[in-house]
Amino acid sequence: MNNKKKYIVAAVIALFVILAVVIGLNYSKEEPVKELTYAVFPYVTDNDYYMDLIEEKWKETEPGIRLVRAEYNCYHDTDPGDIDVFIYDVYMKNDLIQNGWIQPIDREMIQDAEDFYPFSLEGATVDGKIYGIPIFLCGNFLIYDKNCEALARAEHITDLSDQEELLLIATEHKNTSIQYHDEATADILGVGNPAGLECPEADQIMSLIDRLAIDSYQGTEPEDLPAIYDQGIGMGFMGFSEYLPMLDKRLDDTDIKQISFGEGDNIKRFYVDMAAVNGKVDGKRYEKCVELVNIMADAELLADYSSYQNKPKYLLMARKEIYDLLKERYPLYKRLQTLIDGSDNFVIMD
């Protein structure tokens, strides 16, 4: 090999060495993750305890990274700003995705993905990408006195057409009125997400609900209904499963079930709250955020949270294992599990 060729070979080798050093330097420039900000869903009780559990488990796995609590309400804030991890309602999914405020998580990165009710993951999936990990479920249920034959027997709101002032229903509350109208439209038309569909029969159902509602309590806030019912007023009320712990005197005689808001089959519809990663983060920070999201959705952690101070919250959860951990201790969880079992469930979406 002549000197010229030796020079070229040496130059090429030197170039590769320089490139390798530059790439290595750039890689090493990635700042170590020292802290993550996170926010939990603001509409569940005892959030401080939930965050205490998250931080306790986090310290076991990532003692060198500090967790900083933040506040985020997807219905009002929408833009999470610089919060690394937060919980949002899938109902707001489209706005968050379109603005780049959340990013997908590969299914392989979701711990025990098979343990989640399939519909909860499907509701957060767009073009095959999963935008978060499901934690809480919610829906509109009939909570009623088991001794009331009419309510125990009813499968449809229309089964109660001959009843007057039977239920506590916040029919004048804007949010509940919209929800119940959508429930009626879904059940009448047989569709999971009736957004934008017209259904005159749903207006008739709303009139029936007004007749069933105890007149003097129609303007009451929904979260006040359990206390009123517990005082012995009314034979039931429409509400969420987490209203059950608010009962004291009547809890033992109270049951919960789904009921069709029309004459057709009940379409099982649920809100799903997801833990998601901010669209801005990447690299090692993204990996740590996914690790945190998995901890927030951990079955044992959520089971502990659900029995804070030995009092069950009766929150619906997206993981099957949680019910196995709780239902022997709190038999009503067996009933709650029947509400979400099955393959015909829909996620409520905008």
Image (tube, helix red, strand yellow):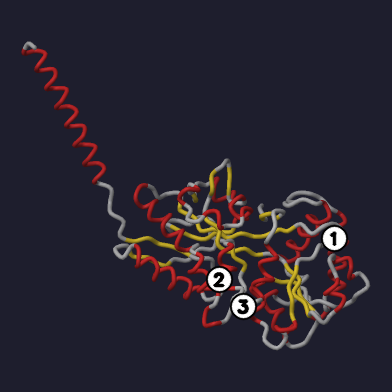
Residue 44 versus residue 203: which sits nearer the camera? 44
Measure how far apart labels 1 and 2 are at the Cα level: 35 Å
Disc 1 residue type (three-letter): Gly
* Image height of 169 relative to 128, above or below: below
Residue where numbered disc 1 is placed: 262
- Helix, strand or loop at disc 1? loop
Q: Which one is closest to the eye, mark 1 or mark 2?
A: 2
Task: Point out which mark residue 330 bears.
Answer: 3
Could you say which quadrant of the image residue 265 lies in?
bottom right
Residue at disc 2, secondary structure = helix
The kind of residue on which mark 2 rests is: Leu
Asked whether the residues under the numbered discs 3 and 1 touch, taking CB atoms below 8 Å apart as contact, a structural biologist would say: no
Q: Which residue is mark 2?
A: 325
- Comes first in the chain, label 3 or label 2: 2
Asked if residue 280 lies left or right of residue 30, the reply is right
Closest to the observer, 95 or 299: 299
Q: Which residue is depicted at the point 70% across and 57% down?
A: 342
First in sequence, mark 1 or 2: give its number. 1
